[in-house]
Image: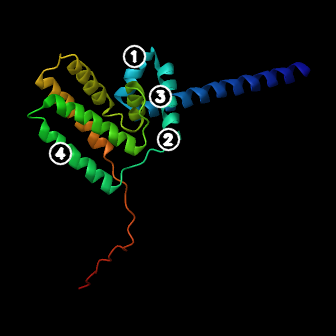
């Protein structure tokens, strides 16, 4: 009898352990899928750079935690309008001064990031921070930065500068989210005409 009770207890413990392992596996798979969906190509880049999914996922979760502690906010309509005007002015400079336009575009992107609440650490930190909310354009941001660095060494031609400018514009457009302004006006009711 005592042996039977011991066997039953052992069987229950084994089942609990198997269930715990299964639950952990399911949880990890869901986390992996969530991170893959959220970060897109940035997930694959992190896996390649850090040497595997577990290290990459730990890094991506750290990024999420870091951004969650910040006060990232959308721009006001006035800020967005001012930044848009600045972009149009910079875009007009490109024909006569591509290098100057790329430098100004990079600076304006940083100003928008600052206005939104992103910290202005080194480039890799900025790119990591941007990847949390804007994963589709972070690779373009990195590519633009590489071209800007080549240009600083005198190694970028006009076509490369145009590519950098387009990349900065993609990030700029993403960052230009505007805060929804609450309206006090009630929605109008539609009149329904019955025949």
- What whole-number distance in Å separates the C-alpha atoms at marks 4 and 2? 30 Å
* Residue where numbered disc 2 is placed: 70
Task: Tell me the quarter of the image containing the C terminus.
Answer: bottom left
In the drawing, what numbered circle is on residue 60?
A: 3
Q: Quadrant of residue 103?
A: top left
Q: Quadrant of the N terminus?
A: top right
Q: Quick one: 178 or 57, which is closer to the camera?
A: 178
Residue 77 in sight here: yes
Q: Which residue is mark 1?
A: 48
Q: Tell which circle, 1 or 4, labels the residue nearer the N-terminal end.
A: 1
Question: Which secondary structure, mark 2?
Answer: loop
Front position in the image: 72 or 132: 72
Which one is closest to the eye, mark 3 or mark 2? Answer: 2
Residue furthest out toward the bottom = 195
As displayed, is residue 68 above or below residue 18?
below
Inter-mark Cα distance, 1 to 2: 27 Å
Q: Residue at x 85, y 21 (%)?
A: 6
Dot 4 crowding, Cα within 10 Å, few <14, some 14–19, many 20+ = few
- The mark found on residue 88 in the picture is 4
The residue furthest left is 96
Q: Is residue 135 left or right of residue 71?
A: left
Residue in the picture at 26% in, 43% down: 173
Q: Nearer the viewer, mark 1 or mark 2?
A: 2
Q: Residues within 10 Å of mark 3 (few under 14, many from 20)?
A: many
Which of the marked residues, 3 or 1, is nearer the chain's N terminus? Answer: 1
Q: Residue, x 34% and y 73% (percent of image)?
A: 187
Where is residue 21? Give x, y as percent.
Answer: 63, 24
């Amino acid at each position: 009898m005592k042996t039977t009770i011991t066997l039953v207890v052992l069987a229950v413990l084994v089942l609990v352990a198997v269930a715990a392992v299964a639950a952990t596996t399911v949880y990890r798979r869901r986390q992996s899928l969530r991170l893959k969906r959220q970060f897109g190509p940035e997930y694959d880049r992190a896996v390649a750079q850090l040497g595997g999914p577990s290290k990459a996922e730990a890094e991506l979760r750290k990024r999420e935690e870091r951004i969650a502690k910040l006060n990232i906010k959308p721009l006001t309509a006035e800020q967005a309008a001012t930044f848009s005007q600045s972009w149009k002015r910079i875009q007009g400079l490109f024909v006569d001064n591509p290098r100057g336009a790329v430098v100004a575009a990079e600076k304006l992107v940083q100003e928008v990031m600052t206005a939104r609440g992103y910290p202005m650490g080194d480039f890799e930190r900025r790119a990591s921070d941007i990847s949390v909310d804007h994963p589709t354009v972070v690779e373009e941001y990195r590519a633009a930065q590489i071209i800007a660095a080549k240009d600083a060494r005198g190694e970028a031609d006009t076509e490369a500068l145009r590519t950098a400018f387009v990349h900065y514009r993609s990030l700029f457009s993403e960052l230009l989210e505007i805060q929804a302004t609450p309206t006090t006006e009630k929605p109008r009711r539609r009149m329904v005409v019955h025949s």
